[in-house]
Image: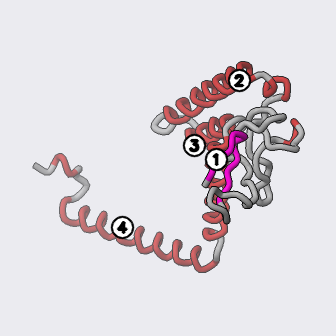
Amino acid sequence: MAVRSDNTSTSGSGPDGEGAAPRPPAAGADVPGTEAGEAAGTEAGEGAGEEPEGGRALGSRAPRFIRRSRPLHLSWQVAVFLVGLAVVVLGVLMLPLPGPGWVVIFLGMGIWATEFVWAQLALRWTRRRVAEAARRALDPRVRRRNLTLAVVGLAVIAGLAGWYLWRYGPVMPWQLL
């Protein structure tokens, strides 16, 4: 495979890959005549990257004037990352403390997803998994199985509690010795 100076490569039929059609540059590579990270032929409001199945295009949602300047866009990304990180850390702290920890964590991921493709992909994966879990939970057979398991579990707990009360009476286990 030969690599050209314009970031395209060929693999081919000839000894040096001659005669083969050039492959497009890798995602995120600088393409002459386009802004960094934008796919050729896209407008500022459309975003960059490939169009996913039934969703928005992947890439930065920063305003066009910010994406035009590399230093400004990098500063924007750092600011978005730090704000998202603060929200995610706050959510993690809320997991053992009172508060909606998971909701805040996903809010922080949503902030990251406005700028970073990896966060957009993680949120799409999470949405698919949650939708699948909800669909399975609403399946009548699964609901019946879960209800049966809950009733059996409660019966076992009630049986153990009854045996404990019959054997030891209303005394806490740490006071038995």
For label 4, the SS is: helix
Q: Residue at label 4? A: 158
Residue 102, labelled with which disc? 3
**Outermost residue toward the left?**
177
Q: CA distance from mark 3 to mark 4?
A: 32 Å
Residue at x 62%, y 44% (from the top left corner) = 118
Q: CA distance from mark 3 to mark 2?
A: 26 Å
Nearer-N-terminus badge (1/4): 1
In the depicted view, which residue is nearer to us: 82 or 78? 78
Residue 130, labelled with which disc? none
Few, some or many residues within 10 Å of mark 1 (<14, 14–19, 20+): few
Residue 14 location in percent, x, y? 66, 62
Query: Residue flagged by tag 1: what amino acid is it?
Result: Val
For label 3, the SS is: helix
Query: Residue flagged by tag 2: what amino acid is it?
Result: Trp
Q: CA distance from mark 4 to mark 2?
A: 58 Å
Residue at x 67%, y 65% (from the top left corner) = 13
Query: Residue flagged by tag 4: what amino acid is it?
Result: Ala
Query: Which residues, given as a range, are shown in magenta?
Result: 2-11
Q: Residue at label 1? A: 3
Residue at x 59%, y 80% (from the top left corner) = 141
Give the label, 3 or 4, closer to the camera. 3
